[in-house]
């Protein structure tokens, strides 16, 4: 587990491990459209926020279940044609004890936190997570409740904007999330998304939720409130083409460039095609060091390559069957993944020029080159149960 995953999973152990959440009565919130959006700078400007929907009915999840929070929190939300706007006004009677560090993205450690969870397809199984500390430092990921092994993927990144500022009474954080950074059904003028808003106060081991909690119900996303957006908003095209040229030159070898590219296209709002030829993974974060002396089994490394991260949860099973790092040096690869309702599917084909490199030395057997194909169809029968 790398630092990025470890930090966020510590937070989500509290958020989700106990979070069989929320009440049987689903809260619904109609989001107002605004014409003059606020500047995202961490400065409170009431001339803008008076037109937002304001919500402040937070309750504790931990440590005192279903009791009033120790600190007051106000949540604001609105939208225009391009962005979803959110803001938190987090009061604190001990502002000197607020934990707010300037850190790298996704490495919020033990900071005070606020954030939202949204399920644009209203599958009640998967959702986007957007988290901010009091200075507006970001973390985002994808939450998957479709199996008994709840999964969070904080390797997923997207473009959004946030800023926060400390005040004598607490802190204020605001953000705007481009609709182009999200995926959701493009049809219709009424959109209903699953929704949570929360606040974490680490000095009290406290987690507050805007949505009422019911611990008897397993899962979290399936117990979300509902955001209603009555507007003709559109998701982004999510079309990417990234070319690359790599090469090596030294005293014994002249420069010989190698061309490659990665391509991604959202065929529909819920089906994605990825293709890579001679992909360049040189800029990917390096693996952490591990001791492999007297190891009976091959070391496990988490996947960090973008081609394999897209919809990786489709290929995850309670007992790991597919380990993508075994595709060590693909010459080319293609992948298509998608969902429709409770159905999910994925297919990967790749030509690997070092198929054993990630686990064993090639000399131990097998061929250097290999074609790799994997396919999966998955149907969620019930909360946490699935076929395929």
Image: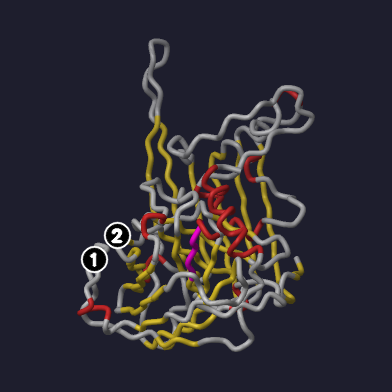
179 in relation to 335, above or below: below
Measured Cα–Cα span from mark 2 to mark 1: 7 Å
Q: Residue furthest front?
A: 93
Q: Position of residue 356 (x, y in %)?
A: 68, 33
| Pointer 2 local density, CA inside 10 Å: few below 14, some 14–19, many at least 20 | some
Which SS class for mark 1? loop
260 and 216: which one is in front? 216
Q: Counting residues from the N terminus, which is met first, the one under dot 2 or under dot 1?
A: 1
Q: Residue at x 60, y 37 (%)?
A: 328
Residue that mark 1 sits on: 43
Q: Are marks 2 and 1 in contact (CB under 8 Å)?
A: yes
What are the residue bounds of the magenta stretch? 198-202
Query: Which of the pair 367/304 is nearer the observer?
Result: 304
Most frequent secondary structure within the magenta stretch: strand
Which residue has dot 2 on it?
Answer: 165
Looking at the image, residue 22 sits to the left or right of residue 135; the answer is right
Q: Residue at x 40, y 57 (%)?
A: 133
The quadrant in which the C terminus is found is bottom right
The residue positioned 37% from the left and 82% from the top of the image is 54
């Amino acid at each position: 587990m790398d630092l990025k995953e470890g930090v966020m999973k510590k937070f989500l152990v509290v958020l989700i491990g106990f979070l069989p959440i929320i009440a049987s009565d689903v809260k619904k919130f109609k989001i107002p459209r605004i014409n003059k959006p606020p500047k995202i700078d961490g400065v409170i400007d009431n001339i803008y926020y008076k037109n937002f929907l304001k919500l402040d009915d937070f309750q504790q999840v931990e440590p005192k279940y279903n009791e009033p929070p120790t600190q007051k929190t106000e949540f604001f939300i609105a939208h225009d044609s391009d962005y979803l706007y959110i803001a938190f006004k987090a009061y604190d009677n001990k502002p000197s004890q607020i934990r707010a560090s300037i850190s790298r993205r996704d490495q919020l450690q033990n900071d005070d936190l606020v954030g939202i969870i949204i399920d644009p397809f209203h599958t009640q199984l998967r959702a986007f997570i957007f988290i901010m500390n009091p200075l507006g430092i970001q973390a985002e990921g994808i939450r998957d409740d479709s199996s008994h092994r709840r999964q969070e993927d904080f390797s997923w990144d997207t473009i959004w904007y946030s800023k926060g500022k400390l005040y004598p009474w607490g802190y204020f954080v605001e953000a705007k999330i481009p609709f182009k950074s999200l995926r959701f059904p493009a049809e219709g003028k009424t959109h209903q998304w699953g929704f949570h808003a929360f606040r974490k106060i680490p000095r009290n081991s406290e987690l507050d939720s805007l949505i009422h909690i019911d611990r008897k119900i397993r899962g979290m996303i399936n117990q979300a409130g509902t955001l209603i957006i009555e507007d003709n908003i559109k998701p982004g095209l999510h079309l990417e083409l990234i070319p690359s040229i790599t090469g090596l030159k030294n005293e014994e070898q002249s420069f010989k460039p190698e061309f490659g590219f990665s391509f991604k296209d959202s065929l529909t709002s819920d089906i994605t095609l990825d293709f890579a030829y001679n992909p360049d993974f040189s800029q990917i974060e390096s693996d952490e060091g591990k001791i492999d002396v007297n190891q009976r089994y091959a070391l496990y490394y988490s996947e960090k390559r973008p081609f394999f991260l897209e919809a990786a949860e489709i290929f995850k099973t309670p007992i790991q069957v597919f380990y993508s790092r075994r595709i060590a040096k693909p010459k080319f690869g293609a992948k298509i993944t998608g969902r429709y309702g409770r159905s999910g599917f994925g297919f990967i084909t790749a030509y690997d020029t070092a198929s054993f490199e990630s686990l064993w030395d090639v000399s131990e057997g097998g061929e250097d080159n290999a074609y790799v194909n994997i396919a999966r169809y998955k149907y969620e029968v019930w909360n946490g149960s699935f076929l395929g």
